[in-house]
Image (cartoon, grey):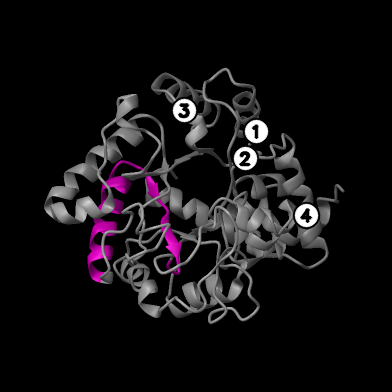
Amino acid sequence: MMISRRGLMAGMAALCTAPAFANTASLDTLVGNCLILGFLGDHAQAEGASRLEDDLAAGRVGGALFLRHNARSRDGVLGLSDRFQSAAPDAWLAIDQEGGFVQRLTDEMGFTDIPTAEALAEMGLDAARPVFAQAARELAHNGFSMNLAPVADLRHDGNEVIDRWARAFGDDPDTVAAYCGAFIDAMEAEGVACAIKHFPGHGRSQGDSHDGFVDISDTWGEVEAAPFERLIEQDKAHLIMGGHLINRRLDPSGRPVTLSAPVLQGLLREQMGYRGAVITDDLDMGAIRNQYTREQAIVDSLAAGNDLLLISNSADADPDLPRRAVDWVGQAIEDGRLSLDRLIDANARIAALKAQVGRG
């Protein structure tokens, strides 16, 4: 259902603490800036790419998410990147380029191979820095402005999501923070924002949130949040990704971190003093998709404190998702499930993140 914009715009003007753009931005723009959407296709002429290009150009979407199925060849991925950059030069182009088993731009496609985090830690920080710098140069040169990395989770033997794939820099918070900090420095120097993941720690989990809920209530320890805390204290953390993780010790309701104000607002912002942007993991992953409608996922993610929403929009592709998101958010503001100032605050943090990496 479409709602009246007049009342919402009046509310924006009344918010004396809002940034200047809030007084002129439409609801469509405020919602669109928060959306980073995936698409179907692995080359520039794909139908899914055409739709996303239109949405980017019109400001209905703030960024494009590249997944494995979008990056199958060098020509294909670079053609897509060029197309999206031309449509919206300031939009985020986001991709997973951790290294090891999680890198979309591979050596088979002509890009530099990045060792696993575990291997980099064994090489030593001095040897790792030029690897990070080369990866950052390649991302920036080819149009990517957001890396969904690094992993700040601690290694724990037997973990099937982090340890199994050697994605952690170690089991000591200071070590992990040092490598993550160097990774971030290299990326930001090239204008690439880094989404540090998976808050408040995925290292001791028993399960994979790609498939369904992962409950860490009995396995998580405060030490797992320590790498994130170190990075916040060192002013290295400007974008943090929460995990689709249930932790009843932090939120007795049992809501996953992605949808949990007690974790994202209470722990991360109020207790740990974080002032940067927060981004969801993919809202189409099984942990969220199997339990919540897209409307619930989008509205509740924003209400919980997320500023940027990743949605792959490929397993059940909806070409009208940007328009529906505006309707859902507008209705949520009208009925009090979401506040307008929360949405404006999200946009302000996105603008600050762009300025941090030289894109503002």
- What distance separates the C-alpha of mark 2 from that of mark 4? 16 Å
**Residue named by callout 3:** 81
**Residue named by callout 2:** 61
| The C terminus - image quarter | top left
Q: Earlier in the sequence, mark 2 or mark 4?
A: 2
Q: Secondary structure at mark 2?
A: loop
Cβ atoms under marks 2 and 4 closer than 8 Å: no
Q: Secondary structure at mark 3?
A: helix
Cβ atoms under marks 1 and 2 closer than 8 Å: yes
Q: State which quadrant residue 138 falls in.
A: top left
Q: Earlier in the sequence, mark 2 or mark 3?
A: 2
**Residue named by callout 1:** 55
User: On screen, 22 above or below 174?
Assistant: above
- What distance separates the C-alpha of mark 1 from that of mark 2? 6 Å
Q: In the image, what residue type sits under mark 2?
A: Val
Q: In the image, what residue type sits under mark 4?
A: Gly
Write down the region rendered in magenta: 174-201
The stretch drawn in magenta includes residue 183: yes
Q: Earlier in the sequence, mark 4 or mark 1?
A: 1
Please tell me how crowded label 3 is: few (under 14), some (14-19), or many (20+) other residues with Cα within 10 Å: many
Please name whichever residue, 14 or 32, is drawn nearer the observer in this view of the structure: 32
